[in-house]
């Protein structure tokens, strides 16, 4: 199995997208805010997390592909 060789900024980007998605889902399920605040903030975080997942997946697959090509050449 290929392991992605991510730079620190790429790794933090992936972690940040997962955190935004998780925080958004948590807010949608929480009861600390009133309904309209909770829904707006939760949906915003879920949207940001979902949209930023696309470049995160592209970065991971790119590094896995590059790492695979480098190991094939050896």
Image (cartoon, rainbow, N blue to C red):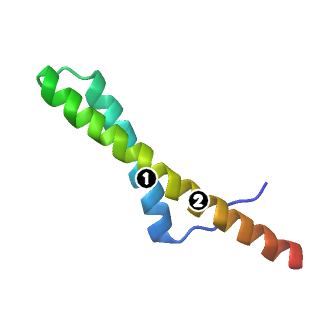
What label sits on residue 52 in the rendered view? Answer: 1
Identify the residue at horizontal 27%, vertical 33% (top origin): 42
Identify the residue at horizontal 53%, vertical 72% (top origin): 7
Callout 2: SS: helix
Q: In the rendered structure, are the residues bearing label 1 and label 2 in contact, judged by CB atoms less than 8 Å apart?
A: no
Identify the residue at horizontal 57%, vertical 54% (top origin): 57
Identify the residue at horizontal 79%, vertical 54% (top origin): 1
Residue 47 placement: quadrant: top left
Q: Which residue reaches farthest bottom?
A: 74
User: What is the x, y in percent for residue 28?
Assistant: 28, 26
Identify which residue, 46 or 72, lies in the foreground.
46
Q: Which residue reaches farthest left?
A: 34
Residue 37 placement: quadrant: top left
Query: Disc count in the image?
Result: 2
User: What is the x, y in percent for residue 74?
Assistant: 88, 79
Give the class, few, some or many, for how many residues have Cα within 10 Å of label 1's Cα (few <14, many ≥20): some
The answer to whether any part of residue 46 appears in the image is: yes
Left or right of 56? Residue 38 is: left
Callout 1: SS: helix
Left or right of 50? Residue 2 is: right
User: What is the x, y in percent for residue 54?
Assistant: 51, 52
Identify which residue, 34 or 40, lies in the foreground.
40
Q: For the residues marked 1 and 2, what is the alpha-carbon distance in whole angstroms?
A: 10 Å
Left or right of 62? Residue 41 is: left
The answer to whether any part of residue 18 appears in the image is: no
Residue 33 placement: quadrant: top left
Pick whichever of labels 1 and 2 is earlier in the sequence.
Answer: 1
Q: From the image, tell me which residue sits under label 2.
A: 58
Give the class, few, some or many, for how many residues have Cα within 10 Å of label 2's Cα (few <14, many ≥20): few
């Amino acid at each position: 199995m290929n392991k992605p060789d991510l730079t620190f900024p790429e790794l933090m980007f992936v972690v940040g997208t997962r955190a935004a998605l998780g925080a958004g889902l948590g807010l949608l399920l929480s009861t600390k805010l009133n309904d309209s605040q909770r829904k707006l903030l939760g949906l915003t975080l879920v949207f940001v997390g979902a949209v930023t997942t696309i470049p995160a997946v592209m970065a991971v697959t790119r590094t896995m592909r590059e790492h695979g090509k480098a190991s094939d050449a050896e």
